[in-house]
Image (cartoon, rainbow, N blue to C red):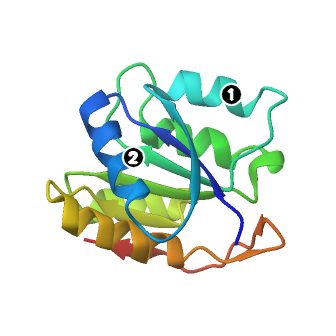
Amino acid sequence: MEKLSIYIADDDLDDRDFFIEALNDISIETEVSQFNNGVDLMDRLFSDDILPQIIFLDLYMPIMDGFECLIDIRNFKKFNNIYIIAYSSIYRDREVNQLKEDGANQFLKKSSSLKELKELLLKSLKQVPIQNKQVILKDEFVVLI
């Protein structure tokens, strides 16, 4: 299996480092680009770079939060095949339902345990349907907490 191309947008450097450490310890190979806010993420998406297969999107960031990014991404046809996993340390039914309506594919609750985060990330990435390097979006919404 080829490496999964992943973008992570999270304003907390420690959280991003922890996330990368967990990703590096699971059995799925990944190539990760990091962004510390939604504006930088959107700039990269609109650049001429190859689009990622998956975006992990922190919900609470300054400048442009994950909710705003999700809506912007889903408003452009060129981003239709990107699998979006919103995540936060806070779980609220109302917000998770809004994420589903706005086009996220998954919600993942952040964990402070490396072991638990690795398990969640492995479960999360195994849910992503990929064929010939292309993500195939399904109408299901997955919540991992």
Left or right of residue 34, residue 94 in this image: left
Q: Is residue 14 above or below residue 142?
A: above
Image spot of residue 116 (x, y percent): 21, 68
Q: Is residue 55 visible?
A: yes
Quadrant in which the C terminus appears: bottom left
Q: Which residue is mark 1?
A: 44
Q: Is residue 79 above or below residue 127?
A: above
Q: Is residue 138 above or below residue 5?
A: below
Q: Residue furthest top?
A: 63
- Find residue 72 and report its image quarter: top right
Image spot of residue 12 (x, y percent): 29, 30
Q: Is residue 125 above or below residue 29?
A: below
Front residue of 70/118: it is: 118
Image spot of residue 125 (x, y percent): 51, 70
Distance, label 1 to label 2, CA atoms, is 19 Å
Mark 1 and mark 2 lie on one chain; the one further toward the N terminus is 2
Quadrant in which the N terminus appears: bottom right
Question: What residue is shown at x 25% (from left), y 33% (from top)?
Answer: 14
Question: What residue is shown at x 57% (from left), y 55% (from top)?
Answer: 30
Q: Nearer the viewer, mark 1 or mark 2?
A: 2
Q: Secondary structure at mark 1?
A: helix
Image spot of residue 34 (x, y percent): 50, 33
Which numbered dot is residue 20?
A: 2
Which numbered dot is residue 95?
A: none
Q: Amino acid at mark 2?
A: Ile
Crowding near the residue tagged with mark 2, few <14, some 14–19, many ≥20 C-alpha atoms within 10 Å: some
Left or right of residue 125, residue 83 in this image: right
Left or right of residue 73, residue 36 in this image: left
Q: Secondary structure at mark 2?
A: helix
Front residue of 43/134: it is: 134
Question: What residue is shown at x 35% (from left), y 53% (from top)?
Answer: 87
